[in-house]
Amino acid sequence: SGVTLVTSALGNGVMALMLTVTTNVLGVFTVPFILNAVLLSAPGGDSGGADTDMAAAAAKLLLKLVISIIIPMAVGKGTREFVEQAPKLTTRYKTELGLTNNSCLIAIVWMSISKSRGKLVRESALNIFVIVVAGVTLHMFFLAMNWVMTTPVLRLPEAERRAVLLMTSQKTLPVAVTIIAYLDETRWGGHGLIAIPCIVGHVSQLFIDAYIASIWAGKDPKEIDAANAAKCAGGVVEEAESRAENGVSSEARVGVAGDPKA
């Protein structure tokens, strides 16, 4: 969905795809250790100071993610590269494959929520509301932070800026649901309840980013880059003229000060 939004927003679709693949792969190898550290720092998560237990738990989660994400992705990529008919079939049945993928994801989320139905029913409306707000707020925070990094700080070209801003602000639901499925329910709570902010965040980011993409779709990145370049060039000229005027004024003051008749 992220790559589609970037393409519709006239952004760099190749960069968006690269960011999607790269961040998902890196996430598999970084999330287990970060998540384990966060969970153990939470109330009731103390492992008694056993760093070996923490590392072992992270390693187990890493192995599960490699088996469930990296290996299937590698098999799919290998099939596409080495089986001659694979690219033609995936192109021909692109819609059907996409619907199958989304249906499997929806089924996993539905089963997680259904499994935790009892705990969800017992939760107060206020807690559910806070979880929903947290999911939306997190995406808004990422958008604001990444706008600062891509616009005034890095000053990326417009097409690349759109790709980086959208893709680095989004969170992937399939990986999140996979990680949640491996958590210990007796210790950290029902998978369905934990999945709510992920689901809400995913839905909210689709609507918010689709609105942003619709605005960008009417603005040509090349024209924006040209306008920014002209603005920067104008600023450089003005600065040079200002420095020249200041230099002339300084020389004039020096000349007046050195003239005995003045």
Image (cartoon, grey):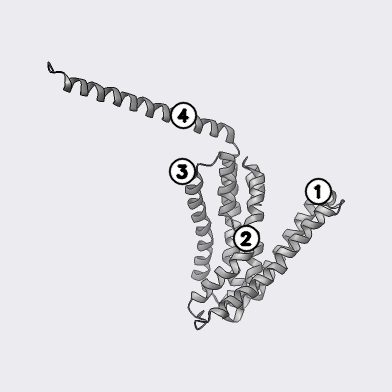
Q: Describe the element under mark 3 as helix, strand or loop.
A: helix
Nearer mark to the viewer, of 1 and 4: 4
Label for residue 108?
none
Tell me if label 2 and label 1 are in contact, CB under 8 Å: no
- 10 Å crowding of disc 2: few (<14), some (14-19), many (20+): few
Instruction: Tell me the residue that label 3 is attached to.
Output: 152
Label for residue 26?
2
Q: Describe the element under mark 1 as helix, strand or loop.
A: helix
Q: Does label 3 or label 1 sit earlier along the sequence?
A: 1
Picture residue at 66% right of the left edge, 75% below the top: 115
Label for residue 91?
1
Tell me if label 1 and label 4 are in contact, CB under 8 Å: no
Observer-nearest of 42 and 107:
42
Q: Does label 1 or label 4 sit earlier along the sequence?
A: 1
Observer-nearest of 215 and 12:
12
Q: Amino acid at mark 4?
A: Ala
Whole-number angstrom distance, CA of label 4 to CA of label 2 = 39 Å
Picture residue at 67% right of the left edge, 47% below the top: 4
